[in-house]
Each structure stands twice: as C-alpha cells, then as structure tokens.
Image (tube, rainbow, N blue to C red):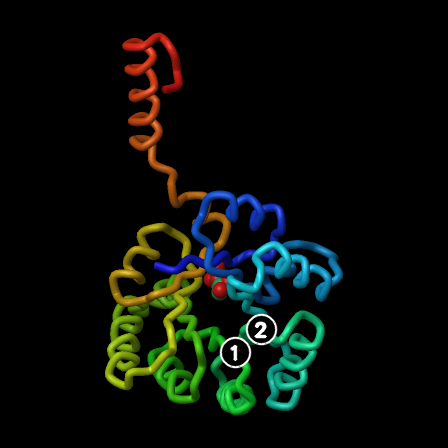
Amino acid sequence: MKLLLDTANQEKIKEYLTYLPVSGVTTNPSILKKEGQLDFFEHMKGIRRLIGFERSLHVQVVAQDYEGMLADAHRLIEGIDDQIFIKVPVTKAGLQVIQTLKKAKLGVTATAIYTEMQALLALESGADFLAPYVNRISVLNGDATSLIAHVQQEIERTQSSTQILAASFKQVGQVLDAVHAGAGFVTLGTDVLDQLLAHPSIDKAVADFERDWDEAFGRKQV
Ligand code: G3P
C-alpha cells in the first residue's frame, strides 16, 4: 500500500513525514479552502520543498470546460513545477483534457471518479492514476470495492501502468477494503491518518513491556 496525504496543511505534512512512509500529497480546491487565505503557488511550492521530488504532488484544475482546464493545467505547471500530477475530474471535457495532457507526456491523475465507466474511460485515455471516491460512493449506496476490483482486473488484463489511487475515506476499515480490492495507492485525510495507529491494545502492550522491564531491571531503557 503506497500512502499519500490528502491535505495541504504543511504542519501536518511535516508531522506525518517524521513517521509515515509517505509517497506523496494530493490536494483539491476544497482541501486548500480549509487552509484559509494563502498564496496558492507559494504554498504548493512549500509543500514540494517538504516532500521533495521523490514523492508525488497532485494538484487539481478548477475550470470545467476543455480550454479552461487546459489553461489551468499549464498555469499549475508554470507556477509549481513540471513534475506535478495534474488532477482532472472525469467529465466529457475532462476526458478530452486527460488525452491532451498525456499526448504532451504530462502526469495526470483522473479524479472525482464515482462510476466504473469513468474509471475505464480514464484508464483508456492514459491517466497515470485513477482516483475513485470510496466514501462518497458508499454514501450513494454504490460498491467502491467492486469498482476497484473490476478496474484493477482491467488494468492487469491490458498490462497498463496506470495505478488506482483510492481517495475519500472516513474510516480505516474502508482503506483496508480498498487495498484488499486491489488499490495500490490510497490518499488519506488527516482524520483518517490520525487513526492509523490508534488502537488501545497497542498502547497497552507497549506500556506493559516497559513496566515489566522496569520491574525486572529497575530502569525504563535497555
Ligand atoms: O481526494 C479526494 C478527496 O479529497 C475527497 O474526499 O472526504 O471530500 O469525500 P472527501
């Protein structure tokens, strides 16, 4: 499981980098809104400085029409760097943008995926990553697990290098289901990231070991 951080909060990104095996950072306009007023391009360049070029940075277009999305994509590349993955929602115009960006050999993450057909079309259009919205699909009574499993089968059948980057999680269990279904990458918000190692039994086991060592050797370190 490759793990990405679905946040634009630099302090949280710094914290997670100290202990999590982080493969990248994903953002979208709603995530950026949570950070309040900021200089967008400076902020994104700051995130790039934190994560380096060995991790991926995914940044979303805002316009909804073909020309607007393409113009956004080029502004993002000029304002941040040319190694970013441009997140494009899978709409009619979005699919066209994905194909154009891939012809130009730019990195693309197909996002806002609610249906298997969106994922299959984005796959065939050459997107590097497909981002199905797991929790949002479940809320709509959809089956995100079967979507991921079917799309992963198609990726393998066509020997494509495209990866599933599952997104929109509310619980750790949903993350495990997505990984079991075949998602190689997941991007998690801070609410789920903070739950990854939260388990009362883990803390108790570690405290018990320290107490037993202390009782046996009279100190709390080796
Ligand atoms: O990466 C997509 C994600 O940010 C959407 O998540 O929590 O708004 O459903 P959410």
State the count of labels.
2
Query: For the N terminus, which image quadrant?
Result: bottom left
Residue in the image at 33% along x and 82% along y? 160
C-beta proximity under 8 Å, tags 1 and 2: yes
- When the figure is inspected, residue 16 is found, relative to residue 220, above or below; the finding is below
Does residue 1 appear left or right of residue 98 in this picture? left
**Would residue 45 appear left or right of 54 to someone viewing this image?**
right
Q: Which quadrant is home to the C terminus?
A: top left
Instruction: From the top left corner, tell me how far across and down residue 90 is, in percent.
Output: 47, 81
Alpha-carbon span between mark 1 and mark 2: 7 Å
- Mark 1 Cα within 10 Å, few/some/many (few <14, many 20+)? many
148 over 51 or under it: above or below: below
Question: Residue at point 24% right, 83% down?
Answer: 157
Q: In which quarter of the image is residue 69?
A: bottom right
Within-10-Å neighbours for mark 2: few <14, some 14–19, many 20+: some
Query: Picture coordinates of residue 173 (x, y %)?
Result: 31, 52
**Residue 58 on image: x %, y %:** 54, 68
Name the residue nearer the viewer: 83 or 152.
Answer: 83
Residue at image coords 50%, 61%: 24
Q: Which amino acid does label 2 sit on?
A: Gln
Residue lying at 64% horizontally and 58% vertically, measured from the top left? 49
Residue 145 marker: none
Q: Name the quadrant containing residue 147.
A: bottom left
The numbered dot on residue 107 is: 1
- The response on whether ligand 1 sits within 8 Å of label 2 is no
Q: Mark 2 points at which residue?
A: 83
Q: Earlier in the sequence, mark 1 or mark 2?
A: 2
Residue type at mark 1 is: Gly
Horizontal side of 172 relative to 19 (left or right) equals left
Of 169 and 59, which appears nearest the observer?
Answer: 59
Q: Is mark 1 on a helix, strand or loop?
A: strand
The quadrant in which residue 72 appears is: bottom right
